[in-house]
Image: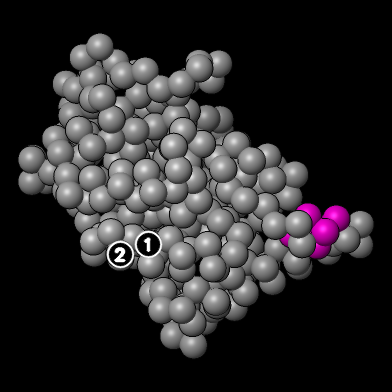
Amino acid sequence: MKTPRISFEFFPPKTLEASFRLWDTVHTLSPLDPRFVSVTYGAGGTTRELTREAVSTLHKATGLNVAAHLTCVDASREETLEIADQFAAVGVTEIVALRGDPPKGSSGFTPHPHGFADSCELISALAETGKFTIRVGAYPEKHPEAADSRADIDWLKRKIDAGATEAITQFFFEADTFFRFRDACAAAGINAPIIPGILPIENWTGARKFATSCGTQIPTWLDDCFDKAIRDDRHDLLATALATELCSDLIEGGVEDLHFYTLNRPELTRDVCHALGVTPKVALRDVA
C-alpha cells in the first residue's frame, strides 16, 4: 500500500489550557511532515482574531506550511480582504476559503450588507490578488442547505472555476461515499484534486451529533459497533481500527492525500497515520 501524503486541521485556542493542548497537538503531529496544516474559524467568525494569531504563531514558530481558514460571515469585503492581506504579510499564502457557518441561534446565512454574498465571490476576490493558493470545502453527501447532491457538485465546480485549486471534503464514514462523489465530480468536469476529510472518532456521542448536524449519513453498523465497544471499554481501539480501515480503502482506491480533522486531540490521528506507514520524518523546529 502506498504511503499517503497527509495534512491536519487544528482549531484556535480560546483558553490557556486550550493553548497548551494545541501546542501539544502540533508537537505530536508535526514530525509526520504534513503537506500543510489548517486553522479554522469558529461559527459566525467568532474566532477570527484567534485564528489570525494562531496562524501567525504556528507559521513563525514551527516552519509548518499553514493554511488559514477565511469566511464571508459578519464582515465586509474590505475587512475580509484586509485579514487576507495580514496573512500574506506574515508569509501565509494558503487559504481555505469558505462561506462559513452562521452565528449560533440564527436561522441561516445572511450576507453582510457590504460583504461577499457567497464563497465563490470570496474565492474570486482572493484569486484576483494573485497572492494565495486557495482550497475549498466539498460535500460528498448532501449539504443540509442544498436541494440535492447534484447542487453540491455544481457549487463545487463554480468554486474551482472561481480560482480554487483543491477541495477538502466533509468527513464521511464509508469509502464508497467518497468514491461515488469523486466519480460524479469527474463526470461534471471537475479536474482539481479532491482530498478526503477524515475524522478519527475521539467521542462517538459528539461525533454522531456533529454528523447529524452536517448531513453525514451514519450507518447502522457503526452505531452497533460503538455501542459494544463503549460497553467493553474499547472505544479508542475501535476508533483507530475504523479510521485506519477507511483510509486504507481510500488509498487502495487511488487516493494519495488525506486530511485529518484532529479536534486538537492528536493521539488517534497519530496512531492512524503510523498504521498507514506515515512515520516521523522531521522534528518540530526549536522556538528561540
Q: Is residue 276 above or below residue 7?
A: below
Tag on residue 264?
Answer: none
Q: Is residue 103 visible?
A: yes
Residue that sits furthest to the bottom in the current view: 1
Give the camera-side residue of 214 and 131: 214
What amino acid does circle 2 point to? Ala
Where does the image place residue 259, in percent across and percent down from the top left?
44, 60
Q: Residue at x 14, y 35 (%)?
A: 125
Q: Is residue 282 above or below residue 75?
A: below
Q: How busy is the neighbourhood of tag 1: few (under 14 within 10 Å), some, or many (20 plus)? A: some
Q: Residue at x 34, y 33 (%)?
A: 99
Residue where numbered disc 2 is placed: 187
- State the SS at label 2: helix
| Left or right of residue 154, residue 17 in this image | right
Q: Quadrant of residue 45?
A: top left
Distance, label 2 to label 1, CA atoms, is 5 Å
Where does the image place residue 236, in percent across and percent down from the top left?
75, 62
Q: Is residue 33 visible?
A: no
Read off the magenta span.
222-227
Answer whether labels 2 and 1 touch (C-beta < 8 Å): yes
Q: Residue at x 55, y 40 (%)?
A: 214
